[in-house]
Image (cartoon, helix red, strand yellow):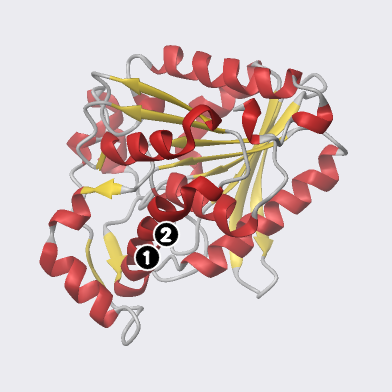
Amino acid sequence: MERFEGFKTASDGARLFSRRWAPDADPKGTIVLVHGFAEHSGRYENVASRLCAAGYVLSSFDLRGHGRSAGRRGDCRFEPTLRDIDELLTQEEERGRGLPLFLYGHSLGGLLVLTYGIERKPRLAGIVASGPALHTSLTEQRFKVLISRALGGVIPSVSLPAGLDAALLSRDPAVVEDYRSDPLVHKRASFGFARDALGAMDRVLAEVCNLPVPLLVIHGGADRVNYVTGSEVVARELGDRCTLRVYDEILHQPHTDPDTETVLDEVIAWLDERVAAPADDRTRPEYA
């Protein structure tokens, strides 16, 4: 497996940190991965290793306000981020020269890739949404919701503690401790980010039936950060166009659980089915 990491400059001048993992042999597809809130792309090394072993390139970047990328910590606005995804997909499409192209997002990343699919209507081979932030514990904090909606357009860069309990991420104690000690993990959420996220949740749940791309949703049934009920709504709205996999004992991060190998085996099987579909048919929703 070959690794690359370094800074790149977005079209608006923002400095973003990117990572790319590629198999030693010729790849059969490319995946652009969008990480979750408060973390960074470097926390997906195990996912990259598994996907590369299966023949896929994995390309990612630290979201604005996250990891090594520029921006106030936790101030990740949606419209610039959607443009960042645009640019990385275009770059990988040009590099791949016709290889099937996928989006994969976890938690906040799951919300972002679903929002991207609905708004941009891309021609992709598929989207994988892992524990997407649709029905979340945030919405139960009514004061934070009200103040974020009210102040998100007035003082968008002002932030509050996010209040994420690391113990809810994984059943593996080593993962929890690593997260707590990771110097690139932060604990802030800006009002502007929260307002954008709440609006995106509403839009995805209302308009997901317009998603033109085959979709796989994976979700921990014991997730207490983003509830599985949001993923169930998506699956119900899309019907046969969505494949939903719920893992009853898994918490928020299916990719860091003791049963991660089983989860990634199913992800790879779904990706392989999309790759095996005739080229003209890969983007048709009925192939989900």
Image quarter (top left, top right, bottom left or bottom right) of the N terminus: top right
Determine which residue is flagged by label 1: 199
Dot 1: element = helix
Q: Nearer the viewer, residue 8 or 190?
A: 190
Residue kind at label 1, given as amino acid type: Gly
Q: Are marks 2 and 1 in contact (CB under 8 Å)?
A: yes
Q: In this view, does 38 lie above or below 57?
A: below
Residue 125 at x, y = what percent?
A: 69, 34
Dot 2: element = helix
Q: Nearer the viewer, residue 15 or 113?
A: 113
Residue depicted at x 23% and y 42%: 225
Image quarter (top left, top right, bottom left or bottom right) of the C terminus: top right
Residue kind at label 2, given as amino acid type: Arg
Q: Is residue 226 above or below residue 30?
A: below
Residue depicted at x 54% and y 62%: 81
Q: Which of 70 and 75 is in front in this view?
A: 75
Gap in angstroms between the C-alphas marked 2 and 1: 6 Å
Q: Which mark identifies residue 271?
A: none
In this rendering, position of residue 264 left or right of residue 83:
left
Quarter of the rendering containing residue 222: top left
